[in-house]
Structures are given as C-alpha cells and as structure tokens.
C-alpha cells in the first residue's frame, strides 16, 4: 500500500504541477484562504488514517470482514443521511435498505452459528 500511495502521489503531483496549472492555483487558493488549507490537510490525514484501518482489517481479519465492515458503514451512512436530511425514501429504496440489512443479518447469523454436535461435514 505504501508504494501504491507513493506512486499515486508522484503521478498526481506531476500532473498538477507539470501538466496543468491546477497545482499552482490550488496553492494560491490555500494561501489566500488558510482555513481551506487546514480543511484540505485534515481531509488528507483522515483519508490516510482510513487507509491504515482498511489495511489493518484486511491483514488481520481478511477481505471478507473488510467488505462487511465497508458495507455496514455505507449502509448506516446512507440511512443516517436520509434521516438527518429528512429525505423520504421511495419504496424501491426501502427495499434496497431491507436487502442490505437482511444480508448483513444473515451473514452475521451464519458466521456465529455453532455446528451441530455429532454431525460431520
């Protein structure tokens, strides 16, 4: 992950500062608006911390657990956003919420179920 991120940073830096004027304009904007620069820095730090958690989850528990964590987080983010913004969900959207919740519940139930005694696989 470190090398991937390093190459990605190099690629973006070359594009921003050598192939276009996006980099210098962004630097001027952040210099003129220090609060925006701090917000960009905080956003980058949160992204880096998030990548570390993803890497730790994959290396410790495997990719299936990571997918479950990601799906659950997205599920609650979307549901929370709908309630906080007082957005009405359509029937098809509620059906999607139900499918995701059912899938997560079923996956958890199957994972925690104990095998019956005396039966061999």
Image (cartoon, rainbow, N blue to C red):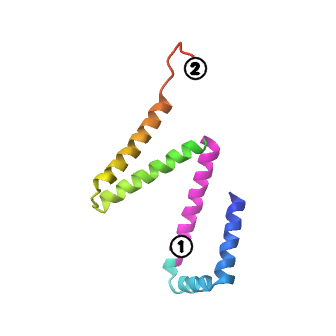
Quarter of the image with the C terminus is: top right
Q: Is residue 114 above or below residue 75?
A: above
Identity of the residue furthest to the front in this view: 92
Q: Residue at x 58, y 52 (%)?
A: 53
Magenta span: 37-61
Q: Is 55 situated left or right of 78 in this image?
A: right
Q: Looking at the image, which is closer to me, 88 or 58? A: 88
Q: Residue at x 67, y 63 (%)?
A: 5
Is 59 contained in the magenta span?
yes
In the figure, 68 relative to 118: above or below? Answer: below
The kind of secondary structure the magenta stretch mainly shows is: helix
Q: Which disc, if any, is residue 77?
A: none
Residue drawn at 31 percent across, 50 percent down: 94
Q: Gap between marks 1 and 2, in whole Å?
A: 54 Å
Dot placed on the residue nearer the N-terminal end, 1 or 2: 1
Residue 81 left/right relative to 20? left
Image location of residue 107, percent across then percent down? 47, 37
Apparent side of residue 35 relative to residue 85 in the rendered image (left or right) = right
| Residue beneath the point at 43% across and 36% down | 106
The vertical placement of 76 against 23, above or below, is: above
Q: In x, y percent, where is residue 10?
A: 70, 72
* Residue 62 point in image, percent of width and height: 61, 42
Circle 1: element type? helix
Residue 19, located in which quarter of the rendered image?
bottom right
Q: Spot the residue most to the top.
A: 118
**What crowding class fits label 2: few (fewer than 14 Cα within 10 Å), some (14-19), or many (20 or more)?**
few
Quadrant of the frame with the N terminus: bottom right
- Percent x, y for residue 67? 53, 47
Q: Which label lies toward us, 1 or 2?
A: 2
Kindly identify which residue carries mark 2.
121
Q: Which residue is mark 1?
A: 40
Front residue (pair 118, 45): 118
């Amino acid at each position: 992950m470190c090398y991937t991120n390093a190459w990605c940073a190099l690629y973006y830096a070359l594009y921003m500062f050598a192939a276009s004027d996006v980099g210098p304009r962004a630097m001027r904007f952040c210099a003129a608006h220090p609060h925006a620069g701090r917000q960009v820095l905080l956003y980058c730090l949160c992204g880096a911390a998030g990548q570390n958690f993803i890497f730790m989850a994959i290396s410790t528990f495997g990719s299936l657990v990571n997918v479950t964590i990601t799906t659950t987080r997205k599920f609650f983010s979307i549901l929370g956003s709908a309630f906080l913004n007082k957005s009405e969900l359509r029937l098809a959207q509620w059906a999607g919420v139900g499918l995701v919740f059912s899938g997560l519940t079923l996956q958890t139930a199957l994972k925690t179920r104990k095998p019956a005694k005396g039966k061999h696989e």
